Amino acid sequence: MSYEIDAFHDSHGIVVEVEAGRGARGNATYRDIIRTSLIVDAQYLALLLPVAYRHVSGGREVLVRAYKECADLLSALYASQRLPLPFHGVLLVGY
């Protein structure tokens, strides 16, 4: 099985995933973490997410705080230690 990722640094094993706009919704963060965990040579994950993304849904404006939601998710994952990630580190960047 293969996955399309945004970038990969071979010698350091760094996978880069950038989620923009709608990509920051719909559990994209979960998919990025799980799919990157399955990449054999992935040692590090650099995940770039919008701090806030606004869109209209059902006639009302919705604010998605992708960066904060992912930071909370990663904090919970590392705190619980029930689902260990196979990375030496995760870099979360908000833009």
Image (cartoon, rainbow, N blue to C red):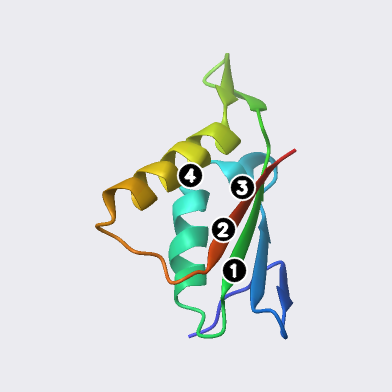
For this view, does 29 lie left or right of residue 8? left
Element marked by disc 1? strand
Q: Secondary structure at mark 3?
A: helix
Disc 1 target residue: 44
Q: Position of residue 83 (x, y in %)?
A: 30, 60
Label 1 neighbourhood size at 10 Å, few (<14), some (14-19), many (20+)? Answer: many
Q: Judge whether 70 appears above or below 2 on screen.
A: above
Q: Is residue 8 above or below residue 45?
A: below
The residue at 61%/47% (across/down) is: 23
Spatial CA distance of label 4 from label 3 is 7 Å
Q: Position of residue 71 (x, y in %)?
A: 51, 40
Q: Whole-Å distance between the Cαs marked 2 and 3? A: 19 Å
- Residue drawn at (70%, 45%), measured in percent from left and top? 20
Q: Looking at the image, is mark 2 or mark 1 earlier in the sequence?
A: 1
Q: Which mark is residue 90?
A: 2
- Disc 2 to disc 4, how far (Cα)? 21 Å
Q: Could you say where residue 36 lies in the image, as x and y percent from the top left?
A: 52, 70
Q: Which mark is residue 23?
A: 3
Of 62 and 5, nearer the camera is 5
